[in-house]
Amino acid sequence: MALIQFIQGINETVIPDVKLTRSRDGSTGTATFRFNNPDILRPDMEDKGDITGMYLKDDEGDMITKDVNAKFINGKPEAIEAIYIIKSPRDWDRFMRFMDKYADDNELSFTKAKT
């Protein structure tokens, strides 16, 4: 099972919009996750602790990014954006294995951008 958490032990149930970019040679890339109105921003979650990063968890282990930002509209948090940097072809393969599991678990599909 593949999960996303912002606080260790608390699963995020809101499915993000994920945008991937990859270098021309395929060796590096960026995954930008955007969660609109995620669970972690609900008022009843305030006492659960602070967001310490975005944790991508599956049977192979954890991938972590600390590049996590809240987006505010009219002074209220509405979304979370997290950026995961992919630094090598091996990291790319690992990230894609996670995304395949996450997509299967959440009945998602991949749409390739038109170039």
Image (cartoon, helix red, strand yellow):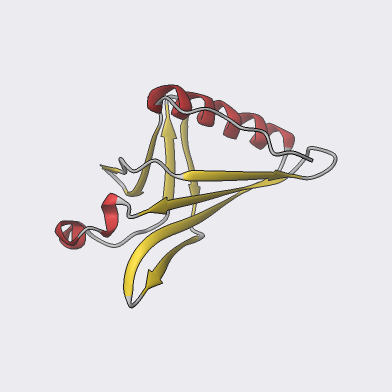
The residue positioned 69% from the left and 39% from the top of the image is 113
> In the image, 25: left or right of 97?
right
The single residue placed furthest to the front in the displayed view is 114
Instruction: Return the x and y of residue 94 as percentages of the image width and height.
Output: 60, 30
View extreme (bottom): residue: 75
Q: Relative to residue 78, is residue 34 depicted above or below?
A: above
Left or right of residue 112: residue 5: left
Q: Quadrant of the C terminus?
A: top right
Residue 18 image point, x, y percent: 54, 44
The residue at 45%/29% (across/down) is: 102
User: Quarter of the image holding residue 73?
Assistant: bottom left
The percent position of residue 101, horizontal first and vertical second, equals 47, 24
Residue 65, given in percent of the width and then of the height, sits at 50, 52
In the depicted view, which residue is nearer to us: 80 or 64? 80
Residue at the farthest right position = 25
Q: Residue at x 41, y 58 (%)?
A: 80
Of 28 and 78, nearer the camera is 78
* Quadrant position of the N terminus in the picture: top left
* The quarter of the displayed image where residue 42 is located: bottom left
